[in-house]
Amino acid sequence: MLKEWLNTTGFEKTREAKKMAKIKKKLMTLEIERCQKKMTHCDVTAVDKKIADHKSAYAKMCEDKR
């Protein structure tokens, strides 16, 4: 009975998948923004920090999913 309650439900799996897809989409937009700033010779450190934060969040979610 305890095992039944501890297993993740289908709803939780889809919610996590949606979160992961949202993070991947945000990473893509940040990479595009980074490229645009590099082309205009602007500072990209703030964008790089955001990318690093999102990558670590995505890696953590992937690790938790296992």
Image: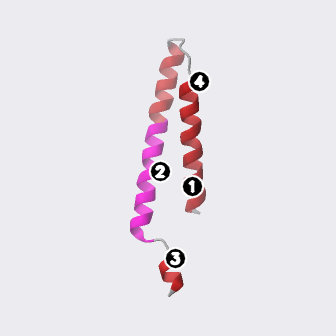
**How far apart are the alpha carbons under marks 4 and 3?**
42 Å
**How far apart are the alpha carbons under marks 2 and 4?**
24 Å
The residue shown at (60%, 57%) is 63
Task: State whether the magenta stretch is mostly helix, strand or loop.
Answer: helix
On-image quarter of the C terminus: bottom right
Residue pointed to by mark 3: 6
Along the polypeptide, which appears first: circle 1 or circle 4?
Answer: 4
**How far apart are the alpha carbons under marks 2 and 1?**
8 Å
**How far apart are the alpha carbons under marks 2 and 3?**
22 Å
* Amino acid type, callout 2: Met
Whether 28 is drawn above or below 46: the answer is below
Residue pointed to by mark 4: 45
Classify mark 2: residues with Cα within 10 Å, few (<14), some (14-19) or many (20+).
Answer: some
Residue pointed to by mark 1: 62
**How far apart are the alpha carbons under marks 1 and 3?**
19 Å
Along the polypeptide, which appears first: circle 2 or circle 4?
Answer: 2
Classify mark 3: residues with Cα within 10 Å, few (<14), some (14-19) or many (20+).
Answer: few
Label ID, residue 20: 2
